[in-house]
Image: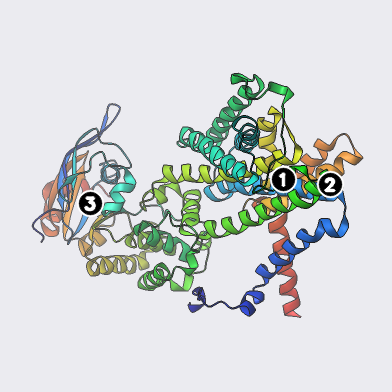
Amino acid sequence: MSTRLPTFGNVGLAETLQNRRLLAGIVVFVVLALYPAMTLNAYHTRLLTWIMCFAIAAMGFNIVLGYTGLLSFGHAAFFGTGMYTVVLVMGRVGITDLVAVMVIAMVVSGLVGAIIGVLTVKTHEIYFALLTLALAQLLYILAVRDIGGLTRGTDGIGVTRPDFFGIPISELPAQIYLLGFYYHVVLVALAATIVLLWFVLRSPFGLTLKMIRENETRAEMTGVPVLRYRVYSMILSAMVVGLGGALYAVLIGHITPEYLDWTMSGEIVFMALLGGIGTFFGPVVGAGGFILLQELALSYTEYWHFTMGLVLFIVVLTLRENGIWGGAKTLVERLNDRRGEQ
Amino acid sequence: MSSEPILKTENVRKDFGSIVAVDGVSVEFYDDEIVGIIGPNGAGKTTFTNLISGALPLTDGTIIFDGEDISGLQKYKRVRRGLVRSFQIPQIYDEMTVFENMQASVLSRKQENNRLFTPTHRDSASVSETERLLELFNLEAHADDHTEHLPHGVRKVLDVAMSFALEPEIMILDEPTSGVGSREKNAVMETITEAAVEQQIGLIFIEHDMELIRDYSDRIVALHEGRVLADDDVAAVMNSEEVNQFILEGGV
């Protein structure tokens, strides 16, 4: 039983390096950080930035699906809100610092999450999915119809380049800006999201979300204000998804309402399912798998939707909530066991 | 017996459409006694306990807990005040280990659900308390098992133990031994009542097994068609003519 209580204060460097998962994480981070400089491959770097933006969004989404146990079909609302906030804050308000813009985007997405959360909190399962879908489509229509003259409808709006703590990075040549600088911003954001969520989801707060997922009646009868915690999880989820959207907006440089549409929500759900909603890193793997698969399928066939659907069908049927990531973990464990037996 | 009742119902009533499930029940409960609730199927036993825990809204009447009117209080707030129930069909968290199930109760009692960043397995206060509780209920061997694979009897004990972890003033048990093998029934009841006496928790338990009622109750409340038929010590209720006529001979 004493193994449950590793002392936190005096963990030395040597001990940290013995933690294989942490070590693997650091290695992956360093390799990714060096990748653009090593390969000078613009296409790959852009693809990786794209994947990382969606990895953040998929992780945020999975707080609600994987931990609180609610299937939302309206997470495009938070992704799109993050994107439009970037444009509006830079274009209309005149705040151009990248970090400030990202923080504002997260706060605004969190607010939208709170509103949608409060409106949907009493519904379950299919009703929750439909209600979140309907509310997200409402935002989509607002953006398409250009109500208030903010979004310029389906034409979309261009995103100007942000500043970074007074450094005029917007004047950098395009290659250096996108491949060098911005890639690393997104990488750090993803790493920070992973570390933060790793702790949050293992804390009493994360356990409370799991209690609600596993047995709402029991959670309530254990003294947990279930509805309030469901709203909390929506807010946290919306903030993380909004960050993903905001980072993606700066990457692509042009925003249209389609990022608020239900197909966007569907893609986020797809990524989480593909990677494994029952695992912590599943959504990250799912985002990578989804985007790579899409690129691959697009280059071979115009029926790429069919290919994607087939893959998801097979993954969900065979691996269920474990997805690709959970399946890979199980495989490695089995191989290790077999090696141990010999 | 304590001078003030910890829980008191006054003319509590529940209608489902034209059916009156609980028809004006007034009973007092104290925090140092074990009360058995008996009655034939449809007598309103479960409905009555659901009214107390807040799972169902009252049609009429008042519920007083610790001197305060809690008739309209939300469920989780009643729990936080010390009015706790366990379930006839175990309500536990399946995709979690026994340890996590128990720790979830411990952390919730301390109202630490909103704590971020400290991983639960590093929270030494709740970890050691969870270990102590698992030992008290003989569950330590199952600590790392996922609950979905546990035998029914163990799930039942865990369900009760999780309610005990909330350190209630009074606890309602809805058939604590249902589904438990007849040989283990006494062991389960022993464990529960010993823990209740030790921690000074008042118990209210619904039970169909008259042996258990006779052996473990200090007092019996007999319900029939939503009304209190008898409310007295064990011998008096068991010997009451009305109780015998409506309940005991009815082959409950």
Residue at (82% x, 43% y) in the render: A174
Circle on res. A168 = 1
**Chain on which label 1 sits:** A
Distance of mark 2 from mark 1, alpha carbons? 15 Å
Residue type of the residue flagged with mark 3: Ile
Q: Are marks 3 and 2 in contact (CB under 8 Å)?
A: no
Q: Is residue B16 above or below residue B215?
A: above
Residue A268 quadrant: top right
Residue A310, position as x, y percentages in the image: 79, 42
* Residue placed under numbered mark 3 in the picture: B37
In percent of width and height, residue A10 lies at 53, 78
Residue located beneath label 2 in the image:
A175
To which chain does the residue with label 2 belong? Answer: A
Callout 3 secondary element: strand
Q: Nearer the viewer, mark 2 or mark 1?
A: 1
Whether A250 is drawn above or below B146: the answer is: above
Q: Is residue B138 left or right of residue A333?
A: left
Based on the displayed image, in which of its 4 quarters is residue A304 positioned?
A: top right
Q: Is residue B166 visible?
A: yes
The image's colouring method is rainbow
Along the line of sight, the residue nearer the viewer: A104 or A143: A104
Provide the chain ID for the residue under circle 3. B
Which amino acid type is shown beneath numbered disc 2? Answer: Gln
Can residue A279 be seen at all in this image of the molecule?
no
Neighbour tally class for label 1: few under 14, some 14-19, many 20 plus, Cα within 10 Å:
few
